[in-house]
């Protein structure tokens, strides 16, 4: 189903019309909110576009899995760990994380850190 | 190959380190520049992230094809035609265009209009 989700800024959060924003309460993840921009609701057949926002001190899980990530930063400043390396990232920086690579996103700054992350639909 | 492509603003153009920017000289396309942010060079296995920028009066081809598009606007203002409908879009608006849907991106404004567009790797 083709669709346009209009962007709306809500206080310090990035949100979109027609997209639900929900906190991630999962072990190993801290201060993270997830928005599925294009996914099951839109019947995306091959890959899913999400937006994650990390509050000050927030981070994703340090993990490795088969799915690759294609990322573009939208907001704030963050750190991306890929393998044993760490990279500072700022808006519009692009990050490709190969499948099976150890990785983690963190926010050490006051401003929220937000990025779009696309993953494949794999079973 | 995991990689970070740092963003750089070059005059009115959006560009990235390690990414080649090239004009699209194809019938039906006008005033368009393409950047493959994550693709063959990064050995992206399932889907490809590109950035397109349309100059004033520029447009993509009015076309339909099997591949879907997952889009997020980064810069300027544009119009997206999906089927017979037209939508005004501005930064961070998200657009999903289903496979086989007629579509076109256009820029009627003075400022360049730029958007990220993800497509599947299909043969």
Image (cartoon, coloured by chain):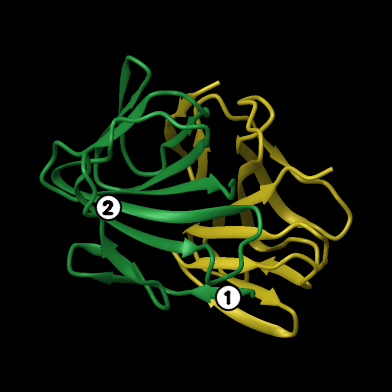
Chain colours: A yellow, B green
- Label 2 chain ID: B
Residue B87 location in percent, x, y? Answer: 32, 24
Q: Which is more toward the observer, B6 or B21?
A: B21
Label 1, label 2: how far apart the Cα atoms are: 23 Å
The residue at which mark 2 appears reads as: B53
Q: Which mark is residue B3?
A: 1
Using a 10 Å C-alpha cutoff, classify the residue at mark 2 as few (fewer than 14 neighbours), some (14 to 19) or many (20 or more). Answer: many
Q: Does residue B55 sit above or below B82 in this rendering? A: below
Tag 1 near tag 2, CB within 8 Å: no
Q: Does residue B103 sit above or below A117 in this rendering? A: above
Extreme-right residue of the structure = A27
Q: Earlier in the sequence, mark 1 or mark 2?
A: 1
- Label 1 chain ID: B
Quadrant (top left, top right, bottom left, bottom right) of the N terminus of chain B: bottom right
Q: Which is more toward the observer, A21 or A70?
A: A70
Q: Which mark is residue B35?
A: none
Q: Does residue B53 sit above or below A111 in this rendering? A: above
Residue A67 location in percent, x, y? Answer: 76, 57
| Residue A112, visible in the rendered structure | no
Do the residues at pointers 1 and 2 share their chain? yes
- Residue B58, image quadrant: top left
| Residue A24, visible in the rendered structure | yes
Q: Secondary structure at mark 2?
A: strand
| Residue under the point 28% across and 37% down | B61
| Residue under the point 66% across and 40% down | A46
Extreme-front residue of the structure = B123
Residue B114 location in percent, x, y? Answer: 30, 50
| Residue under the point 63% across and 32% down | A44
Q: Which is more toward the observer, B115 or A120?
A: A120
Extreme-bottom residue of the structure = A84
């Amino acid at each position: 189903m083709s669709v346009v989700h209009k962007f709306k800024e809500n206080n310090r959060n990035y949100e979109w019309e027609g997209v639900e924003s929900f906190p991630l309460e999962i072990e190993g993840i801290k201060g993270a909110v997830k928005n599925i921009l294009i996914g099951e609701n839109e019947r995306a057949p091959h890959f899913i576009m999400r937006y994650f926002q990390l509050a000050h001190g927030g981070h994703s899980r340090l993990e490795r899995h088969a799915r690759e990530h294609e990322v573009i930063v939208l907001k704030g400043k963050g750190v991306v760990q890929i393998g044993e390396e760490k990279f500072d990232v700022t808006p519009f920086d692009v990050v490709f994380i190969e499948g099976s690579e150890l990785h983690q996103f963190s926010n050490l700054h006051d401003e929220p850190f937000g990025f779009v992350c696309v993953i494949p639909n794999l079973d």
